[in-house]
Amino acid sequence: MRQLNFDLQRLLEGDRQGSHGTRRMRRFVLMQAAETLHRLGYRGLRARGLKGRHVEALVVEWQRQGLGAGTMRNRMAHLRWWAGKVGKAGIVRRDNASYGIGTGAR
């Protein structure tokens, strides 16, 4: 298992915040984000090493994949959770529009 995946697993196991469905989706999205970052060339990344460039790279990749605005908003919420848990809440901007993620109808 890659170190980032392991670190994220530890963060997830230590936190009981949210419903079972929310926690399951958070685990899925964060593991997927870790795999995407590895595929994009960010090797040796640790959970506490999250930086703005990693968030930007994920958003660009999601846009390249053609994901909907709602899906990207949900994934950003999980990235904000991650950033908050490692003490770097300011890394992920609060405004999705600043990443080019449309607001769309809710």
Image (cartoon, rainbow, N blue to C red):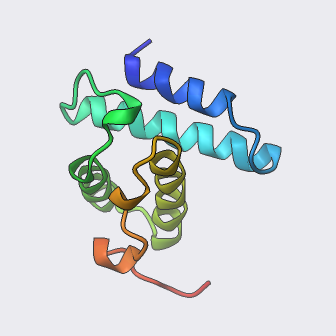
Give whichever of 49, 34 is nearer the camera: 49
Give whichever of 101, 47 is nearer the camera: 47
Residue 31, x across and y down, in percent: 49, 33
For residue 100, what is the image quadrant?
bottom left
Left or right: 19 with respect to 71? right
Residue 36, x across and y down, in percent: 34, 37
Q: Please, is residue 48 above or below residue 61 in the view? A: above
Residue 17, x across and y down, in percent: 74, 47
Q: Quadrant of the N terminus?
A: top left
The residue located at (50%, 51%) in the rendering is 84
For residue 97, what is the image quadrant?
bottom left
Q: Residue furthest front?
A: 87
The residue located at (53%, 44%) in the rendering is 85
Give whichever of 60, 88 is nearer the camera: 88
Left or right: 87 with respect to 97? right
The residue located at (49%, 85%) in the rendering is 104
Give whichever of 51, 60 is nearer the camera: 51
Q: Please, is residue 38 above or below residue 88 in the view? A: above
The residue located at (25%, 56%) in the rendering is 56
Q: Residue furthest top?
A: 1
Q: Residue furthest bottom?
A: 105
Q: Quadrant of the C terminus?
A: bottom right
> How many marks overall?
0
Q: Please, is residue 38 above or below residue 94 in the view? A: above
Residue 47, x across and y down, in percent: 40, 32
